[in-house]
Amino acid sequence: MIFAEWKPLDELIEKLKAHEKVLLAGCATCVAECAAGGEKEVETLAPLLRMALKKQGHSVEIVTATIEKQCEWEFVEQLAQKTARVDAIMSTACGIGVQALAERFDPTPVYPGVNTSALTIREEAGLWTARCAACGDCVLGETFGYCPVARCAKSLLNGPCGGTRRNGKCEVDEDTDCIWNLIVERADQRGQLESLSRLKRAKDWSNSRHGGPKRVIRKDLRQ
Amino acid sequence: MSDICQRPDQELEVVVLYCQHALCEEAKGSGWSQQTGGLSVRAIMMPCSSKIEVAYILRILESGADAVEIVACPEKSCKFLVGSLRAGRRVEYIRGLLEKIGYGPERVGISRRLSQSPEELLHVARTRADAVRPLGTNPMKKGE
């Protein structure tokens, strides 16, 4: 899932204080899974912001709405009625949702309520870890299902580096596995350790963010 | 016992959310409210303290209550095993949020007890009221 976290409350308050009526818009998909921007979080953030704004002497009305997905125009449309009666929107969706609302409801200003930071899996309650970096040239087939781009602190493609701890953890964070240690272990278990010593062609980064803004066309799906 | 009745100009409203199992058998009910000596207490029964969401507590504070006290079972006595533990973690989270917006973490607290009488709940509410008294009344209170 796309992972996001609330922006600092001070930053949110700073954006909202100049407005009269604001729509706090949640998204019930990824950001709900990571407990940052779904209905529950919107209904938590709204009273908190109202209280903070009132305490600072700002009279801002905050209304709320959460839609299934802010990254699909059909769902975004469901916010049209509510946005017509506000002078600003704060979205707790990922950056995709924020931009969708900004485009659809222009010129109403749309502020991000969260910082989108990773593509994660929920390991257990309250713990998420990054699993994908959307690098555009997946190497998981050669790294035994562990992603060194997202999960190695240095994104090494020829790890491990010299910083692996004795217990197999990363030198950067004692609670994070050295992913190259896991790759080597799994290769060894499968009797394919040799495959890691083969020379690999340089990774093609042109299909990642390094290649500029992505625009994908599938002619078979076009109307 | 607090001297709350000596400050009639600063009536405090405390909402007590209590686990149904934290109350003695004869006192069980869906809730009650009481006004006494400058203190207004509204007690609401919950099926388990873990059912108390962060948003509920914030909404109670937003509506003008000066403080919220959760009365949960002792952690090892929780009939749902982790309910009291979860409630405790949520209270800590809310207190952190309140601190960030300058509301004072003291406005929310948790106490863990079993077989409480309504009088004992009232005492818990008074203790919470005493903790928030230095903060003054909730700025969200109507007319503030």
Image: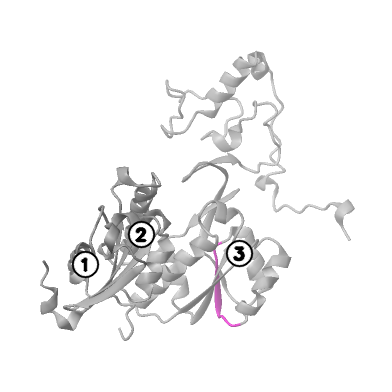
Determine whether the residue tagged by mark 1 lies in a helix, strand or loop.
helix
Dots 1, 2 in contact, CB < 8 A: no
Residue behind mark 1? B122
> Residue B142 in the image: x percent, y percent?
33, 83
Identified by mark 1, the residue type is: Leu
Chain letter of mark 3 equals A
Determine whether the residue tagged by mark 3 lies in a helix, strand or loop.
helix
> Residue A220 in the image: x percent, y percent?
89, 52
Numbered circle sitting on residue A98: 3
Q: How far separated are the C-alphas under marks 1 and 3?
A: 47 Å
Is residue A98 placed above or below A206 in the rendered structure? below
Dots 1, 3 in contact, CB < 8 A: no
Dots 2, 3 in contact, CB < 8 A: no
Task: State the residue in front, A75 or A97.
Answer: A75
Q: Which residues are magenta?
A: A85-92
Chain letter of mark 2 equals B
Residue at the spot 58% in from the left edge and 38% down from the top edge: A150
Residue at the spot 48% in from the left edge and 82% down from the top edge: A20
Chain letter of mark 1 equals B
Numbered circle sitting on residue A121: none
